[in-house]
Image (cartoon, rainbow, N blue to C red):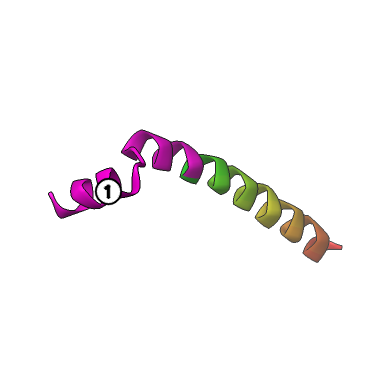
Amino acid sequence: MRNRLIHEYWGTSLEMIYEVSVFEMEDLLKYIYLLREKLKY
């Protein structure tokens, strides 16, 4: 309940936060993948 109040207060929906975190996660995975490729050589 407390989390919902905070989200409503800040004017953000859980769906939006989820989409943003999924998008950020994709970038993070790409970065980790590139890092691993560089470390191989």
Q: Tell me: 21 left or right of 12.
A: right
Q: Residue at x 27, y 48 (%)?
A: 9
Q: Tell me: 33 left or right of 7.
A: right
* Main secondary structure along the magenta-highlighted residues: helix
How many residues crowd around disc 1 within 10 Å: few (fewer than 14), some, or many (20 or more)?
Answer: few
> Where residue 21 appears, x then y in whole percent?
47, 45
> Where residue 23 appears, x then y in whole percent?
55, 40
Residue 12 within the magenta-colored segment of the rendering:
yes
> Where residue 13 appears, x then y in whole percent?
33, 37
Q: Quadrant of residue 32?
A: bottom right
Q: How many marks?
A: 1
> In the rendered structure, which segment of residues is drawn in magenta?
1-20
Q: Residue at x 59, y 43 (%)?
A: 26
Which residue is at the far right? Answer: 41
Q: Looking at the picture, which amino acid does disc 1 mark?
A: Tyr
> Where residue 40 appears, x then y in whole percent?
80, 62
Q: Residue at x 79, y 65 (%)?
A: 39
Q: Tell me: 24 left or right of 18.
A: right
Q: Residue at x 41, y 42 (%)?
A: 17
* Quadrant occupied by the C terminus: bottom right
Mark 1 — residue?
9
**Element under disc 1:** helix
Residue 38 within the magenta-colored segment of the rendering:
no
Which residue is at the far left? Answer: 1
Q: Tell me: 23 left or right of 19.
A: right
